[in-house]
Amino acid sequence: MSLTLLRQGLGAKPPRMWHDRPLKNHYDVVIIGGGAHGLACAYYLAKDHGITNVAVVDKSYIGAGGSGRNTAIIRSNYLTPEGVRFYDASVKLYEGLAQDLDFNVMFSQRGHLTLAHNDGSVRTMRRRAEVNKLQGVDSRLVYPDELARICPQLDLSDHPRFPILAALYHPPGGIIRHDAVVWGYARGADQRGVDIHQYTEVTGLALTNGAVTGVQTTRGDISAGLVLSATAGWASNVAAMAGLELPLDTFPLQACVTEPLKPFLDVVVVSGSLHVYVSQSDRGELVMGASVDPFTSYNVAGSLDFLEGLSGHVLELFPFLSKARILRQWAGLCEMPPDFSPLMGITPVENFLIDAGWGTYGFKASPICGKTMAQLIATRRTPDLLRPFRLSRFAEFDQVGEKGAASVGH
Amino acid sequence: MQPRWATDMLRLECPNCGVRNAAEFRYGSEYTPRPSPSTDASDVEWTRFLYLRHNSMGVQTEWWYHRSGCGLWFLVERDRRTNAIARTWRWQPLDQPEIDAP
């Protein structure tokens, strides 16, 4: 390793982590969407199941969508047992991911605090803590005396408009370098024979007798044994190519970072009541986000409303940041399902699988989603972890209500 | 013209009050026809009405509510790629008798 580093430091051209290969006429599996989800699925298909005639196609460069736009928070302190089990399996995979991929993803399990500013929130936090404990997840309710030790930077006085009453403390939660996750999966998949086609937009799906048999792209048609849509934000449009409607609404979600500051914050702080989450990156920037925009759109323009609202709420928590300056802001697309739980698995259209509805919580689920979707593709049986998140749950009126823990906008 | 800020685009014309700032309004949802409760609509139709959306990357007809104004629910045609608004109008019960506010 160090020898490689030295050689590359002396000017040798670094090896490419993935390659541009010609588009083949046929693939056993075509994955639409080269984000963390699609690449993870391709990686586990090749690694766990030996299925390597796989293409990952993306209309842009890999990781250009939600995978590169999220605020990189990883946690598993959800509200429903189904959700907690799923996201906890994801955290476990993240813990071993750097080893598995031989790529430093810089997963920092620094602890995660969800603040409660009113009695209703305290009740929800207690419920979440108990559900988490039952599933074996480290999560508990802490009060201001302990909170002052975990995060002394917080304004715990009664001066703010909504004083902090308690918090849900989740020590395994943390942040990660999201680009590294995308690149690590891409390299791992590429090494095992998966083709990654960037700048290849899917324009249509080929259907024969109600079954998907291929995809049409801007670079030509491909026949496919099976097609998986793993696009965040655009899933409704891909599903429409197969004649399907999904229970999704696409909202922009904005985030921003400040100029680098001295390291002062070593936990992730979230407040549902104030619609805000804050963490400090290794570069010292404060990474901050809020709830989704107030109306649906595919437009990722930023808004002053967002910056104003977010800054005001962050100052409620950390008044000493009043002189910090915003460096940049951006937005990504979030497709929100009615119950705030993802849609994964089979659809009424044969050979067409979806991995959609990832709203504001998709990135943290990438490894387990990739692994279980790969299992589903290889075995043609829905793994138990995925069953609660099937698309048919809406027609069966069997939703997985995760709103209390999946979003900050409630 | 592509709006620079998402809120710049959002000056909506309320059928009662005229052009107003977005902050006065609340977004409702995509306009979906409701099955008439007086007919024997099947579970499939109700599921469709309750949950399924076109969510199209293009022009959408949708409900808006003039929250800080006259309180009217009205219809808007908006391009969701640019947020440009084509038209706003009052819902007409005579034209579409089976449709109600969500």
Image (cartoon, coloured by chain):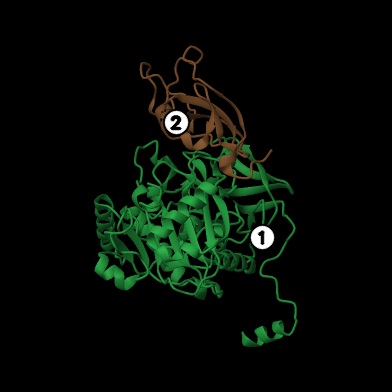
Chain colours: A green, B brown
For discs 2 and 1, the disc positioned in front in the rendered view:
2
Percent from the top left, x then y, of residue A406? 39, 52
- Left or right of A137, for residue A238: right
Quarter of the image containing the N terminus of chain A? bottom right
The residue that label 1 is drawn on is A195
> Residue A74 appears in which quarter of the rendering?
bottom left
Tell me if label 2 and label 1 are in contact, CB under 8 Å.
no
For mark 2, name the chain.
Answer: B
Percent from the top left, x then y, of residue B83? 60, 37
Residue at horizontal 55 percent and vertical 51 percent from the top: A332
For the residue marked with disc 1, what is the amino acid?
Answer: Asp
Percent from the top left, x then y, of residue A101? 54, 72
The label shown at residue B48 is: 2
Residue at horizontal 51 percent and vertical 13 percent from the top: B95
Report whether mark 2 lies on the same chain as mark 1.
no
For the residue marked with disc 2, what is the amino acid?
Answer: Arg
Give the vertical position of A105 relative to A379 (above or below).
Answer: below
Percent from the top left, x then y, of residue A102? 55, 75
For mark 1, name the chain.
Answer: A
